[in-house]
Amino acid sequence: MAGHQDRHVGLAHPAPGRSRASRRDRPPPAEPLRAARAGCRARPRALKYWVRARQGMTVLDALVEVQRGTDPTLAFRYACRVGMCGSCGMVINGRERWACRTLLSRLERGPVTVRPLYHFPLIRDLVVDMEPIKRKMLESKAVFVPRRPAEDDEGFAAVSGRSRERRAVDGAIECIGCGMCVSACTMVAHDSRFPGPAALNRVFTLQRDSRDGAHAERSEALLAEDVLTRCHTQANCTAVCPMQLSPTDSILALRRRALLQLVGFRPR
């Protein structure tokens, strides 16, 4: 995406079997910096750092080390550091990943390339604006609409974990909005009106929720030209989901329900 800048982290791996690093194993000096800071008019370029890889070190650890030592102006987002919040999503070696869950030792030897997520407005460096996810959720009506007013309800309506209703959506309810599926989706870039995998996955869970009162309204919206039929089922979104969800399956399920409605059947 125009305006995004890549960050290269060069790793100097310790030689196996040595307790102390020799002169040859020491990380080389920093490469000449060639970078365009976010907001500058210069052409975006790569900025290279050197980090010594340690046992169990993650990409997030490496970025924090760079920020604390080499370049305190390097901007990236993180919070929990344990794979729960999804804040540290970025493109690492060409694939969407959580930086806190990506061990350097599991990547191919050589430079590790990190860049911001695709299809999101760039704020600075590796930080993107997540507003498009919220906007697509609202446009797709991917928000819960209670069937009964809150004042008429004595409490929360419980759905048994063993019920058919719950089992139907059990594999789709753990989305935390990290945005990696949106970044990996090629159709998001091609058609700005396409809701994207995150929003459609949420719509699927709501359409199967008996407590929700907006099924008919959503069903009509799903039949629009730029919604369900725009997904080419490449499953890029499913491949990168760190929660092991399958937005592709959710979209296919919505298609089946839409088809049944078109031919006069009421989907269960």
Image: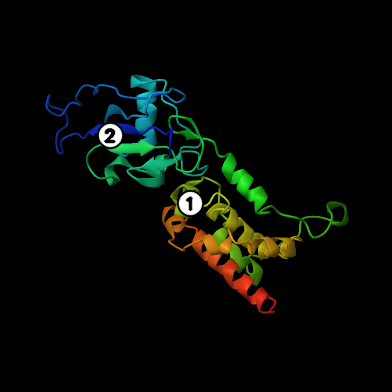
User: Nearer the viewer's eye, disc 2 or disc 1?
Assistant: 1
Disc 2 residue crowd, few under 14, some 14–19, many 20+, Cα 10 Å: some
Where is residue 211, by image quadrant? bottom right
Q: Mark 1 points at which residue?
A: 190
Residue 77: % across, % down: 48, 33
The residue positioned 44% from the left and 27% from the top of the image is 75
Q: Say if 155 sits above or below 259 in the image.
A: above
Q: Mark 2 points at which residue?
A: 54
Going by the numbered disc 2, the residue's amino acid type is Arg
As measured in the structure, the alpha-carbon distance from the residue carrying label 2 to the one carrying label 1 is 41 Å
Going by the numbered disc 1, the residue's amino acid type is His
The residue positioned 42% from the left and 40% from the top of the image is 90
Q: Say if 73 sits above or below 237 in the image.
A: above
Disc 1 residue crowd, few under 14, some 14–19, many 20+, Cα 10 Å: few
Could you tell me which secondary element the residue under label 2 belongs to?
Answer: loop
In the picture, measured across the screen, residue 38 lies left or right of residue 200, that is left
Residue 79: % across, % down: 51, 34
Q: Relative to the observer, which residue lies in front, 78 or 252?
A: 252
Where is residue 158, by image quadrant? bottom right
Residue 19: % across, % down: 17, 31
Residue 114: % across, % down: 36, 37
**The N terminus lies in which quarter of the figure?**
top left
**The C terminus lies in which quarter of the figure?**
bottom right
